[in-house]
Amino acid sequence: MQNSKINVIELFAGVGGFRLGLKKANPELFEVVWGNQWEPSRKAQDAFDCYVHNFETGIHSNEDITSVSNETFIDLEPNLVVGGFPCQDYSVARTLSGEKGLQGKKGVLFWEIKRVIENTQPKYVLLENVDRLLKSPSSQRGRDFAVMLATFRDLGYTVEWRVLNAADYGFAQRRRRVFIFAYKNGIAFEQAQNNYSKDQIIFSKGFFAKPFPVELEPYQDRITSVTLPTDIVSISDDFSFGFHTGGIMKHGEVFTAHVIPVEEKPTTLRDILIDESEVDEKFYLSESQIEKFAYLRGPKKIERKSADGHVYLFSEGGMSPTDDLDKPGRTMLTSEGSTNRSTHIVEVNGRKRFLTPLECERLNGFDDNWTSTMSDRMRYFCMGNALVVGLIKRMGKRIEEIEKLNTQTDIQLEMSLKS
Ligand SMILES: C[S@@+](CC[C@H](N)C(=O)[O-])C[C@H]1O[C@@H](n2cnc3c(N)ncnc32)[C@H](O)[C@@H]1O
């Protein structure tokens, strides 16, 4: 069967992790027609420049997404909208007049995603966020995610989500993120899913279960369901719920389970290191840096003062002085490479050093030298913001399967209408 293209809008594109993953899944199928990336309050737009350097086709937009008009999206007719966006406060209130609808907090980027979906009605939406999203805010656990699910319900979508630690599925980094896949009610895939129970979808048949298998039983019987209140403002005001690592929401009915991944052999830090002869001298730690990192990574108890003058004891446990080369890397943060306890330190041939920017690209599965247009500091920063490309590749292949099902059904429907 001939594939027709899936037009993609990539929001919050950074250096293009989603786009690269989709390209690796099937370069003929996914066509990114519009990629938007804008680093707030900075003149230099390194991530955007890197994106332009690596991808030729489609429109590259370097604008604040909040200033992009609805008409811009409508004309693009996307079938898929993707993006990794920040975890912010998603509470909503009624507008003062009451009739005009709902008001979310200003500057909250999820409402921009909603605006794009509302205006373009794509078949699929694929999003990434920190796993904390499922629990936030701490004062009203699960409120933000419930507001998000209710938003998708009201837009006519079914949502599946899954917390994935990339290392569990064979990748080189222990990076836990929640992935959210929404699909339009009424498409063939959604109809086909109606043949399964919600737990079958979570454990074996759903969007995530096939490319990222899990044990067929939940962890410690943690499996629950809830009906979202119809009124989104009441969700925002009062609703609280413990969302687990896997789940589905259909027509406001939520079903969620703490899933156990069927682990694959991980890639280790050692596997992604470049040949030591190619490591520039600047990446090796000086004596004073060795001392500084020994302190930062060591256990400590320090007296600190809060903003209101309250004195408290800050304590943190010790980490090993260097990262274990026989394990996957830890989560890479935007501060990677700076004097910070979360920065990776490796010891090779008896010498301690930082990971090079190229090794950081490998931790995320980007092609070597993907970010070579930037300074080292920005290369580390952009990799800390990015995602594990191989996860998106698997999701892209899954979307391809789903799309085939949708296309076949469309053809059958057309033929039955003709006969
Ligand atoms: C978590 S990062 C996404 C990284 C991306 N997935 C990648 O692979 O590099 C979020 C991105 O959103 C961008 N961003 C933040 N506010 C924005 C806005 N108002 N308009 C457009 N982009 C914005 C940031 O500059 C950042 O690159």
Image (cartoon, grey):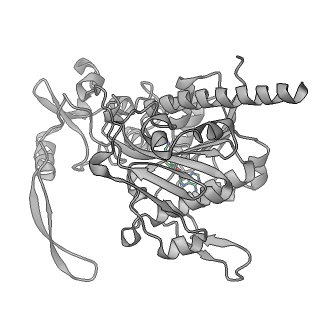
Q: Describe residue 174's horizontal placement relative to residue 15 as left or right.
A: left
Horizontal side of residue 26 vs 408, given as left or right: left
Q: Is residue 317 left or right of residue 153?
A: left
Picture coordinates of residue 47 (x, y %)?
Answer: 51, 42
Q: Which residue corresponds to the image point at 53% horizontal and 36% vertical from the top-left?
A: 18
Question: In x, y percent, where is residue 412?
Answer: 77, 26
Asked whether the viewer can see residue 277, the reply is yes
Residue 173, picture quadrant: top left
Number of callouts: 0
Residue at point 58%, 61% (across, down): 150
Residue 37: give x, y in percent of width and height: 58, 46
Q: Position of residue 134 (x, y in %)?
A: 42, 57
Q: Nearer the viewer, residue 292 or 335?
A: 335
Please tell me which residue is depicted at 62% across the width and 36% down the height of the picture.
192
Residue 85 higher or lower than 307, as above or below: above
Image quadrant containing the N terminus:
top right
Is residue 207 or residue 347 the one in the foreground?
207
Q: Relative to 235, say whether 397 is above or below.
A: above
Establish if 156 lies above or below 307: above
Q: Is residue 328 left or right of residue 349?
A: right
In-front residue for pair 194/123: 194
Q: Decide if residue 9 is in sight here.
A: no
Which residue is at the far right?
418
Where the C terminus falls, by quadrant? top right
